[in-house]
Image (cartoon, rainbow, N blue to C red):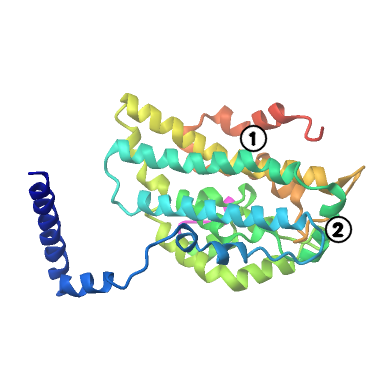
Amino acid sequence: MEEQDSSSELLKKLEQLSAKYEQNGQNVSDYLDSMMHTRYLNYWDYVQLETLLSLQRPKTDVKDEMIFVAYHQITELYFKLILWELAQLTDGSVTEPKVFLDKIQRLNRYFHQLESSFSIMTKGMEHRQFNEFRMALIPSSGFQSVQYRLIELHSTDAINLVHPDHVLWLSSESTDQDFLDQLYWKAGARDVETGEKTLMIRQFEEKYDEVLLDAMTEARDRNLRQQIQPFIQNGEALSEQIIEELRTYDQLANVYWPLAHFRTAVRYLVNGKEDKPATGGTNWRQYLPPRYQRIIFFPELWTDEEKDDWGKSWVLEHAPLEE
């Protein structure tokens, strides 16, 4: 009896497979024939282990540079997961509040992992070794992470990513290029002494400005902020939970993450009263602290007092910055 049930179940699955392939004009028998010659899947091939482990290529012989390059690659993989969820949150396919909440919580898990793991950078390298290999990385900078710029563009309206001093320069007639030119991080990519664009940002613009411009155009009416209203307006308990998760996402991306970088920069780049320059030539003391940029994805979810104190609670919790 058990054998008959098993055969019946197998036949049912074959019929389902046949129907699936017939929808696209394919013959399921051809695919079954191919399986006769297909190798069993193993873990190392699935995760492309050998290729993955070959991608860490330090520029110097300083041992701790391996930590630096590997951690940045791990960061980019988390950014990829964040963008993966944002794409689903903004394409109109998520209509159920529970699904929306689940995906926002996923974003927060990724950012929590990034922020909490940054101690690998802050405390995990010898001060001397870091300052030996860092100059070999000129003019590159983590500032050049295009994935993080895409996360920002897909999270909120472009006006919320404009440096506060430059908002008045824009109007209803401003183009996407105008907005791109005034994004807050563009202001942070100027040479400390001359005020001119650094080589780092010129390289980045040449490589990615077209990509970012296309993303800005796509995200104009399809960013995360544009999607939240149906999920936060009905006043139900689930709506309150969604609001809290969105506020957490805002803080993780725009307060905790940049200040984790700031803490690390202070540890490695401050020598007495003199600051060492960033490899990209940026003014990191003005660029990294959220209180200067005040970038907020969902301004409607915060009180005026909270926005005025943006980033202050983190500084109080983690002060002093150096042990």
Label 2 residue SS:
helix
The residue tagged 2 is 132
| Side of 202 where 11 appears, left or right | left
Residue at the (41%, 47%) spot, across then down: 224
**Quadrant of the frame with the N terminus:** top left
Q: Where residue 280 sits: x, y (%)?
A: 75, 61
Residue interval drawn in magenta: 167-172
- Is 308 located above or below residue 228 in the figure? above
Look at 62% across and 43% down and name the residue there: 257
In this view of the protein, which residue sits in the foreground, 147 or 194?
Answer: 147
Vertical order, 78 against 259 (above or below): below
The residue at 74%/47% (across/down) is 286
Quadrant including the C terminus? top right
Which residue is labeled 1 in the image? Answer: 311
- In the rendered structure, does residue 231 fall within the stretch colored magenta? no
- In front of the other: label 2 or label 1? 2
Residue at 65% of width from left, 52% of height from top?
A: 71
Q: Secondary structure at mark 1?
A: loop
* Residue 206 position in % (x across, y down): 61, 73
Residue 251 vs residue 99, the one in the foreground: 99
How far apart marks 2 and 1 lie (CA) works out to 32 Å
